[in-house]
Image: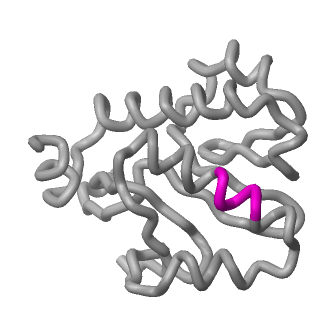
């Protein structure tokens, strides 16, 4: 298996987000940082060059190989902000119906800006995703130590 491109780095999340040229997207991203920080009780870390992740779990591929991945994450892409949540979106149909303007991929929720969505519903969706991920996946050793505290 090839080395994954997206892995945990030591790069500065603040430097990355503060360099975003669009002021509104920058403000929205900092608000999402606070939502995800509250849901995971973890500090943001940069994964690869442009994914801000919180916490970590061990993703197991079909061939049995394991890889760390954030419990929740987001990336300020063009034209949307991509949120990486639990892959089981169908269980969140009721919340998604109340969310507002968005679209979904298999594990991604796409929003253009926070003003397009109902923020309390987005917070509930992030919290539900984190709870589901912690219940159904093997946390990394670092995440296990935090959960024991």
Residue 118, by quadrant, is top right
Residue 94, by quadrant, is top right
Which region of the structure is painted magenta? 27-31
| Residue ID at (68%, 19%) | 95
- On screen, 88 above or below 58? above
The main secondary structure of the magenta stretch is: helix
User: In what quadrant of the picture does the C terminus appear?
Assistant: top left
- On screen, 67 above or below 82? below
Residue 40 in the image: state x and y as whole percent: 38, 44
| Residue sitting farthest toward the top | 94
Q: Going by the image, does 12 lie left or right of 59?
A: right
Residue 137 in the image: state x and y as whole percent: 29, 39
User: In what quadrant of the picture does the N terminus appear?
Assistant: bottom left
Determine if the magenta segment contains residue 30. yes
| Residue ID at (57%, 19%) | 91
Q: Is residue 61 visible?
A: no
- On screen, 105 above or below 26? above
Q: Going by the image, does 112 lie left or right of 132?
A: right
Residue 70 in the image: state x and y as whole percent: 41, 57
| Residue ID at (45%, 64%) | 44
| Residue ID at (66%, 75%) | 17
């Amino acid at each position: 298996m090839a080395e994954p491109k997206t892995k945990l780095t030591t790069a500065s999340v603040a430097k990355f987000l503060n360099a975003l040229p669009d002021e509104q997207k920058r403000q929205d991203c900092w608000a999402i940082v606070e939502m995800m920080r509250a849901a995971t009780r973890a500090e943001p870390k940069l994964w690869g060059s442009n994914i801000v992740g919180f916490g970590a779990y061990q993703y197991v591929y079909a061939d049995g190989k394991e890889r760390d991945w954030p419990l929740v994450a987001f990336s300020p892409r063009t034209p949307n902000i991509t949120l990486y949540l639990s892959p089981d979106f169908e269980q969140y149909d009721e919340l998604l119906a109340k969310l507002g303007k968005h679209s979904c991929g298999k594990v991604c929720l796409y929003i253009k800006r926070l003003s397009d969505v109902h923020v309390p519903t987005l917070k509930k969706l992030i919290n539900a995703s984190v709870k589901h991920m912690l219940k159904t996946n093997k946390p990394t050793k670092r995440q296990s130590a935090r959960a024991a505290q």
